Amino acid sequence: MQKSKIPDPFEKSRIEMGIGKMDDQNDPVTMLLRHKDVRKTAHNYKTFQSAAQPGRIVIPSEVNIRKTRQIPFELDPPVHGLYRKVLEPWFKRPLEEDYSNKLKAQINSLVDEIITKEKFEVIEAFALVLQSRALTLLLNTSFEEATTWISWGTHVFRSEDTNLDADKANILYDYIDKQIDKAIENPSNDLYSVLLATKVDGVKLTKEQVKGVMVLTFAGGRDTVINAITNAIAYLSEHQESLERFRSEPEIINNAVEEMIRYFSPLTQMGRVVTEDTYVCEHAVKADTRVSLCWASANRDAAVFQNANELIVDRKINPHVGFGFSHHNCLGATHARLIMRILLKVLAEKVESIDLFEYKENVEELGDFKRKVGYDYLNARFNASKK
Ligand code: EMZ
């Protein structure tokens, strides 16, 4: 019961001080660790802003590799709400039956292919492929585009050598620019074309704004979804009984997905820029410095979650902040939840047990804290259910 565990490195600081500190490219961050403070600060967009210099609220900061503002993620109310409102219907399409049937067909066929292998690498051969193919549904674009995205690897801004890879980022920006130009010449019913025709307050989105939505769509749901899938597989390999429960009690799958998002917290934290000298958790913070809402820590807060360090697949009350909180909660959450629900269902139907082989943990270095967020690689085998 070791490999799939995600330890909580924040517990001591959360209890004793409520905050943690880390540096990030000489732009230090005060991390908020308690559920209550994270939620309170997420609401207070006037003092803790998202609409700062593009890239600055992300940790590690992307100010040196990105000029485009991600929309609606790097906006504050009330403007944020105007964009959010026009984007929301599109990002809720995963609730449609046709969308979920298509996703189910994709996941079924991927599992059918992988189950024949003696051994496969979960991230490259499974999670990245699944995430990229599913994204063709969210963009309403051709299935073949996934091949290009798979070739970019798990993160669009990070590579093996560096956390912030400008060359890699440029591949994404150039690709999106080209797709936008194509959609201008030849409008279709994909996300680019829909965004180009979208109006906010009676004014059409500019090319730069369309790009801002697209960069977010590509970047925000990539390593996060990949981590969720990979961690789920590691967990299930050590908890065959959960696979069995998903078979006999499929009604708990939705709870299980929420619990996995809480326990895995695929996105550790998100920053805000402080607009005036103030206090967080009785600790002074200066204007123009950064705080972070540490979702991963809040999700283990014993003041809110009983047995917080255990993954309880049928946990009932689960006010986790794994998809963020308040007006900025994850726009892609409907899509991500559907991926996870279908994945658990398909695995329960087809897979009896999962074996794990060589693996390497992906550990984030966050000042005094080291947090496992997933794996750099993880080798596995799916053992087919005996029909
Ligand atoms: C940003 C972020 C959004 C950022 C919800 O998270 O995800 C990160 O992976 C990206 O690097 O640019 O999109």
Image: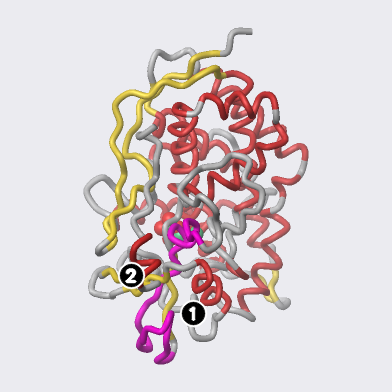
- Residue 174, placed above or below residue 110: below
Residue at 34% in and 56% down = 9
Mark 2 is on which residue type? Gly
Residue at 70% in and 29% down = 249
Residue 199 at x, y percent in the picture: 70, 70
In this orientation, does residue 75 appear? yes
User: Residue 118 in magenta?
Assistant: no
Q: The residue tagged with tag 2: helix, strand or loop? A: strand
Mark 1 is on which residue type? Gln
- Which is nearer the N-term, disc 1 or disc 2? 2
Q: In the rendered image, which quarter contains the C terminus?
A: top right
Residue at 35% in and 65% down = 62
14 sits left or right of 76 in the view: left
Picture disc at residue 20: 2
Q: Nearer the viewer, residue 365 or 170?
A: 365
User: Residue 289 in magenta?
Assistant: yes
Residue 281 at x, y percent in the picture: 43, 80
Picture disc at residue 49: 1
Q: What span is colored magenta in the figure?
A: 276-302
Q: In the rendered image, which quarter contains the N terminus?
A: top left
11 sits left or right of 330 in the view: left
Mark 1, other Cα within 10 Å: few <14 / some 14–19 / many ≥20: many
> In terms of image quadrants, where is residue 296?
bottom left
The quarter of the image that holds ligand 1 is bottom left
